[in-house]
Image (cartoon, rainbow, N blue to C red):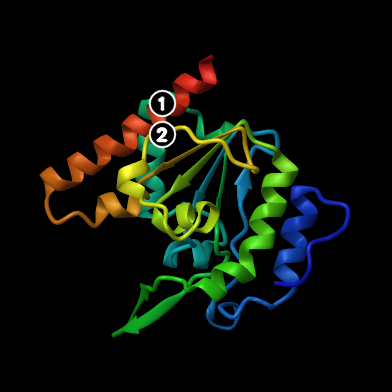
C-alpha cells in the first residue's frame, strides 16, 4: 500500500495508503479501506479487516457488524462520532461462494504488510484507550499467544496507548449459533465497552 508520508496527518496517511499496492490483498479488493473518525479521539477501536460492505463503500464498520457495534457503543454511553475506528488489514480478503464473496482470515504476511499503516494511525492519534475487536487484532498487537476469551475485559498497558482492552469482534456475536448464544456474546462485548466508558470518565 505504498509508503507512509514523512509528515503524518490522518488525511495524508489515507491518501498515501490508497495509492500504493504493496499489500498482497490489494489486487482483489475494490479499494483500500482506511480508518475514520475523530482525529483527536481518546478511544481507537481496531478490528480485523473490512468486510464486503466496507470494501464496496470504502469505510470501516458500515455493514451488519458495524451496526451491531454502533448499538453496543450507544448502550455503553460511547459516542461513535468521538472515536476512531480502523482495521489491522486495510483490504477485504475473500473467497468466492457462488455469487457471494465470503470473508477469509488474513495470514501473518498480509497482517504484516498493513501493520505500518495501523501503527502510523495510532502514532498520529495517540489514543488514551485502544480497543482490539477480535482475536486477529489482539494477536496482531499483543502476540500470537494472546488468548482473547481468557484475557478479554482486562486493561493492559502497551506502547500504542496507556490502556488497551481486548474484546469480541461484533461479527463473532453475529456468527453465534442461536439467539441465546448471540445474547451471551453481546453481553461480553457490551460489558467490555462499558468498562471503556468508565475508564473515560475517570
Residue pictured at 36% horizontal, 49% vertical: 148
Quarter location, residue 157 = top right
Mark 1 Cα shell of 10 Å, populated few (<14), some (14-19), many (≥20):
some
Nearest to N terminus: mark 2 or mark 1:
2
**Quarter occupied by the N terminus:** bottom right
Residue 144: x and y in percent read 45, 61
- Point out the residue furthest to the front here: 145
Q: Is residue 198 left or right of residue 186?
A: right
Looking at this view, name the residue that lies furthest to the right: 7
Most distant residue in the top direction? 202
Camera-near label (2 vs 1) is 2
Q: As rendered, which of 111 and 89 lies closer to the eye?
A: 111
The percent position of residue 131, horizontal first and vertical second, equals 49, 41
> Where is mark 1, residue-wise?
195
Q: Which mark is residue 154?
A: 2
Residue 72 lies left or right of residue 29; in this view the side is left
Q: Is residue 38 left or right of residue 69?
A: right
Indicate the secondary structure of the residue bearing disc 1: helix
Q: Is residue 61 above or below residue 77?
A: below
Q: Which mark is residue 136?
A: none
Looking at the rendering, which quadrant does residue 23 occupy? Answer: bottom right
* Mark-to-mark CA distance, 2 and 1: 9 Å
Residue occupying the point 32% across, 30% down:
191
Q: Residue at x 47, y 59 (%)?
A: 48
Q: Residue at x 18, y 40 (%)?
A: 183
Position in image of residue 95 (x %, y %): 38, 81
Amino acid at each position: 500500500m505504498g509508503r507512509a508520508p514523512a509528515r503524518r496527518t490522518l488525511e495524508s496517511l489515507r491518501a498515501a495508503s490508497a495509492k500504493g499496492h504493496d499489500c498482497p490483498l490489494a489486487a482483489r479488493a475494490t479499494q483500500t479501506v482506511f480508518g475514520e473518525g475523530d482525529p483527536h479521539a481518546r478511544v481507537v477501536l481496531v478490528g480485523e479487516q473490512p468486510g464486503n460492505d466496507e470494501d464496496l463503500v470504502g469505510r470501516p464498520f458500515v455493514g451488519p457488524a458495524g451496526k451491531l457495534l454502533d448499538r453496543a457503543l450507544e448502550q455503553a454511553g460511547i459516542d461513535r462520532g468521538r472515536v476512531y475506528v480502523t482495521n489491522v488489514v486495510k483490504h477485504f480478503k475473500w473467497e468466492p461462494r457462488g455469487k457471494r464473496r465470503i470473508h477469509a482470515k488474513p495470514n501473518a504476511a498480509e497482517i504484516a504488510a498493513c501493520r505500518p499503516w495501523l501503527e502510523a494511525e495510532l502514532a498520529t492519534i495517540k489514543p488514551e484507550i485502544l480497543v482490539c475487536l477480535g482475536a486477529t487484532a489482539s494477536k496482531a498487537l499483543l502476540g500470537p499467544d494472546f488468548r482473547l476469551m481468557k484475557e478479554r475485559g482486562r486493561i493492559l498497558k502497551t506502547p500504542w496507548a496507556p490502556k488497551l482492552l481486548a474484546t469480541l469482534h461484533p461479527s463473532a456475536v453475529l456468527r453465534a449459533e442461536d439467539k441465546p448464544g448471540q445474547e451471551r456474546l453481546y453481553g461480553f462485548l457490551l460489558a467490555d465497552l462499558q468498562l471503556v466508558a468508565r475508564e473515560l470518565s475517570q
